[in-house]
Image (spheres, grey):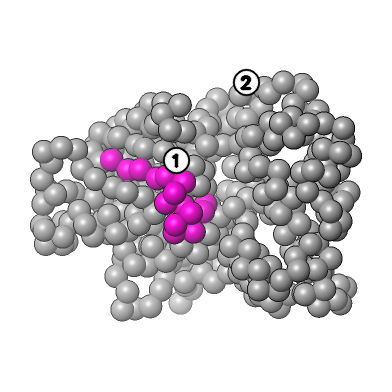
Amino acid sequence: MTATIPTVHFDTSDLPADKRFDTWRSAVHAHRAWLPEGTDPAQFCAVVDAWTLGELVVALSRLPAVFLARTPEMARADGEDWMTLAFQLKGATVFTLDHGGLVRTIGPGEIIVFDMTRDFRSETSAHEVITCAISRRAMLQATYEIPPHHGLVIDGGWGRLLADYMLSLVRQLPEMAAADAPGLGRTFVHLLGACLKAASAAQPAISRRTADTRHLAETYIEDNLTSPDLDPVTICKALGISKARLYRAFANSEGVTAYIRKRRLAAIHVLLNNPRETRSIGEIAYQYGFVSDAHFSRVFRQKFGFSPRDVRAGQPVAVDAGADEDDETTIFRRWIQRLS
């Protein structure tokens, strides 16, 4: 018998009334969740169907009015970091992002993207939504750099194309074989990458001066990834610019220092996948500025979700449904945790 894509089905009506909301809340563990004032938790009714494709977790949820929140402090504390895509099918959701600096109201047919290391709060009516949680490593394998996307609404032709694919996924996944999961995930990630690029291009542009500075800095960084002196001070001296100008150029990402580390880790990842690369992991890491094996291994695992040794050994990310004794919320939570 052909194995199907791992799935979980969760329905609060199967639970005792006093456990319904708390059990569902444990599944969305990376968020703070609460109910509107005056709501009886015993009346909470949620139905969720979810599937894992390894680097992508898809869920179709039918939920009552509920509030969710995520803060950068939560991300730093729990270490969980991925991208979330929400396609509203029914109802409406008001999202407040960037400490109240951005408010978006999403209705049926609209798709919004989140960065789970950034803050947001959502307030919903009773609603139905398709969500996709995607690991950053999967996105970075499909695109050189992930465009700024926190709070980005994907609409127009690209939005309709992405919506059609998401609807088709939830219809077809119950019948798909587990062997199909990697291909389905790659197709989705490449489509999302194209959508993000198109949607970002339609956003207000940064100044030409800032864009030119970013380009010059990225080129310099790429040419000097193995230099032990690669840091903001050296970049500023080499390009003849101020620190303030350099920092402005990377303001929409994680910052220039984080960008340097990200590019170094990505370069090492490529080398470890090369069968002709015979140097030890420690030698390669040292060449790219990591003087401590333990520190390198830790930050590499934080970024990609697996160790440098796993890459060299060619070990794939496992796709399974979890142990038989685990309940649905535990299985779902483990799928999500693997994305970080």
For marks 2 and 1 on the same chain, the one whose residue lies earlier in the sequence: 1
State which quadrant residue 88 falls in.
Answer: top left
Query: What amino acid type should be assigned to the residue bearing mark 1?
Result: Asp
The residue lying at 27 percent from left, 54 percent from top is: 25
Q: Position of residue 35 (x, y in %)?
A: 20, 43
Label 2 vs label 1: CA separation?
A: 21 Å
Q: Position of residue 314 (x, y in %)?
A: 70, 74
Which residue matches tag 1?
119
Q: Foreground: 33 or 259? A: 259
Which residue matches tag 2?
204
Tag nearer the camera, 2 or 1: 1
Mark 1 secondary-structure assignment: loop
State which quadrant residue 203 falls in.
Answer: top right
Per the rendered image, the range of residues in magenta is 67-82
Q: Where residue 187 is drawn, which disc sits there? A: none
Q: Is residue 173 visible?
A: no
Q: Position of residue 278 (x, y in %)?
A: 86, 77
Mark 2 secondary-structure assignment: loop
In this view, 50 is above or below 208: below
Confirm or deny contact between disc 2 and disc 1 (CB under 8 A).
Answer: no
